[in-house]
Each structure stands twice: as structure tokens, then as C-alpha cells.
Image (spheres, helix red, strand yellow):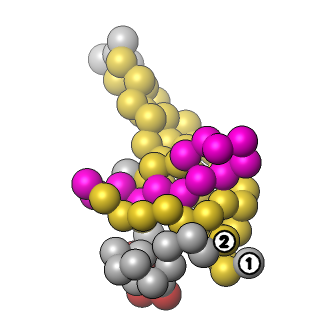
């Protein structure tokens, strides 16, 4: 059984849209939307993203792209690592 995991860390700026259906969504340049499947606990302790308090707030976004390669299938996970208000 072949398996490997790769990680890439990325920084960008974007506007928090909402928390729905278990995803934290941000709009970045060009109207692209990032929806994070995972979030670091420290981010939730700093920012209550489940409330409407930060909707439309601009952030510097630090996140990881995690690719799990399990045999013939690749799973891509976006994990929100940190945020800073702009």
C-alpha cells in the first residue's frame, strides 16, 4: 500500500464570508472562495467565527494545503492555521 502526505503553507488576504455547513469561508482576490475543512483551535479562541461578528472583516490568512495520497485517490484538506485582522 502506497501512502504519502504533502503540506504546503500559504499566506493570502481575504474577507471572511461566513461559517456554514461546517466550513469557514473567505473570499480572496478574483472572487475565489476558500472553504476550510479544518481550523486550528487557537484561531477559534481568538475569533468567534461562528457568530456574525467577523462577517465582511478583512484578514491576513495563514493556511495549509494538505494532500493525502492513498493509493489511487488524493484527498486535499485546507486547514486554517492563523488569522490577523487587516
In the foreground, 23 or 51 = 51
Q: Is residue 40 above or below residue 28?
A: below
Please state the horizontal and vertical placement of residue 43, each as a whole percent of the image. 48, 77
Horizontal side of residue 43 vs 14, given as left or right: left
Q: Residue at x 74, y 78 (%)?
A: 86
Please state the horizontal and vertical placement of residue 17, each as a whole percent of the image. 49, 62
Horizontal side of residue 68 vs 26, given as left or right: left
Picture quadrant where residue 85 is located: bottom right
Q: Are marks 1 and 2 in contact (CB under 8 Å)?
A: yes
Quarter of the image containing the N terminus? Answer: top left
Q: Which residue is mark 2?
A: 58
Give the magenta-colored segment's residue range. 21-33
Picture quadrant where residue 7 is located: top right
Q: Is residue 24 magenta?
A: yes
Identify the element where label 2 is drawn. strand
Q: Residue furthest bottom?
A: 46
In the foreground, 47 or 41 = 47
Amino acid at each position: 500500500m502506497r501512502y504519502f502526505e504533502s503540506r504546503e503553507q500559504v499566506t493570502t488576504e481575504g474577507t471572511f464570508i461566513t461559517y456554514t455547513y461546517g466550513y469557514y469561508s473567505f473570499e480572496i482576490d478574483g472572487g475565489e472562495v476558500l472553504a476550510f475543512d479544518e481550523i486550528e483551535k487557537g484561531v477559534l479562541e481568538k475569533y468567534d467565527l461562528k457568530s456574525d461578528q467577523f462577517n465582511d472583516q478583512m484578514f491576513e490568512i495563514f493556511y495549509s494545503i494538505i494532500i493525502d495520497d492513498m493509493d489511487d485517490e488524493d484527498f486535499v484538506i485546507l486547514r486554517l492555521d492563523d488569522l490577523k485582522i487587516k
